[in-house]
Image (cartoon, rainbow, N blue to C red):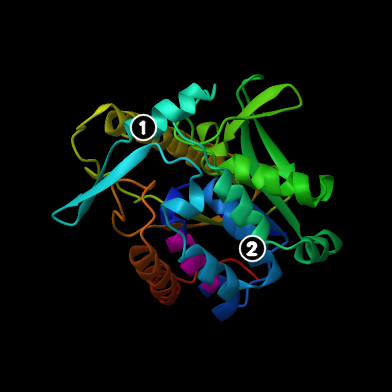
Amino acid sequence: MRALVISGGGSKGAFAGGVAQYLIQQKEITYDLFLGTSTGSLLISHLALGKVEKINRVYTSVNQDSIFSNCPFTIEKKHGIATIGINHWNVLKNFSKGSKTFGESHNLLKLIKKSLTPAEFQTLKEQPVEIVVTVSNLSLNQVEYKSIKDFDYEEFCEWIWISCNYIPFMSLVRKYGCEYADGGLGCMVPIEEAIQRGARVVDAIILHTEVTHLNRMPSRNPFSLLTNMFGFMLDRIEEQNIKIGKFTASHRDALINFYYTPTILTTNSLVFDQEQMRKWWKSGFVYASGRSEESNDVGPV
């Protein structure tokens, strides 16, 4: 059984799309399990359908308005680097409505439903392949994995959306009496879950460099401080996920092929720049191609 695992990483998911395109179209690898966290959850349904070009078009044409119904920050570019500031009016407007977060991301849910049709969902339900997204249950203090096999169209689209909700900048969702948020808050790279579900070969796309680099700008305001703080925490979670994944693989006789980003793509993955994301998609494809030529460690198809 072979699994494709895609980590969280916001706009950097475009790079993962390029890597996955190479593995699926050029290497002609067939996957039995697709497992994603946050931005990874947006990709896996279309990858499982083999509709790589479609998700490429969708993914590389989004902007802030595609994601946020109420964007809590402003974006300013200086010397080619995007920095965020507080959109005081939008934040106050959100709080006046009784929201617990600075912003809302209901436009992303609309985009998910627009890009994944009920007919495509039904096709996936009827296939033997399994698609799983990661969410964080804040009320029960646990990570949960939601399989397409267990839900109808509306609810599974909602779980994909929840997996991407990077609080406190995006929507906090209440379901079944519990508060749910971005899966990356608990598990950035669900390698262990893939192996627990039976995978013996895992292709893991990690939207982070393998070697730690200085990759954050100094904090300029409370929002940039929050994003830096959360970035630090998520990096530590990701590191632990990889260690646990390697440990589990060694005890289950499983093989993991890692695909890291070769360079730092961005200092803020909440900024969705269409031109930049198109470049990342292409660079992901080229990187996977080069890595495949250098190494023969990609496991059996």
* Nearer the camera: disc 1 or disc 2: 1
Which residue is drawn at the image coordinates 83% and 59% (left, top)? 125
**Would you say the magenta stretch is mainly helix, strand or loop?**
helix
How many badges with numbers are in the image? 2
Give the CA distance from mark 1 to mark 2.
31 Å
| Badge 1: residue crowd in 10 Å (few <14, some 14–19, many ≥20) | few
Q: Percent x, y for residue 220? A: 19, 32
Vertical relation: 98 (above or below) 183: above
Residue at x 31%, y 31% (from the top left corner): 223
Residue 110, which numbered label? none
Relative depth, front residue between 185 and 5: 185
Task: Provide the residue designation for mark 2.
Answer: 115
Residue 80 against residue 170 in the figure, above or below: below
Q: Is residue 51 left or right of residue 278?
A: right
Hey, what amino acid is under mark 1? Trp
Q: Is mark 1 on a helix, strand or loop?
A: helix
Q: Quadrant of the C terminus?
A: bottom right
Q: Does the magenta stretch include residue 17?
A: yes
- Disc 2 residue type? Ser
Q: In this view, does 139 lie to the left or right of 215?
A: right
User: Can residue 218 be seen?
Assistant: yes
Q: Mark 1 points at which residue?
A: 89
Residue at 58% over, 43% down: 106
Q: Where is residue 286 in the image (x, y as percent from the top left)?
A: 39, 74
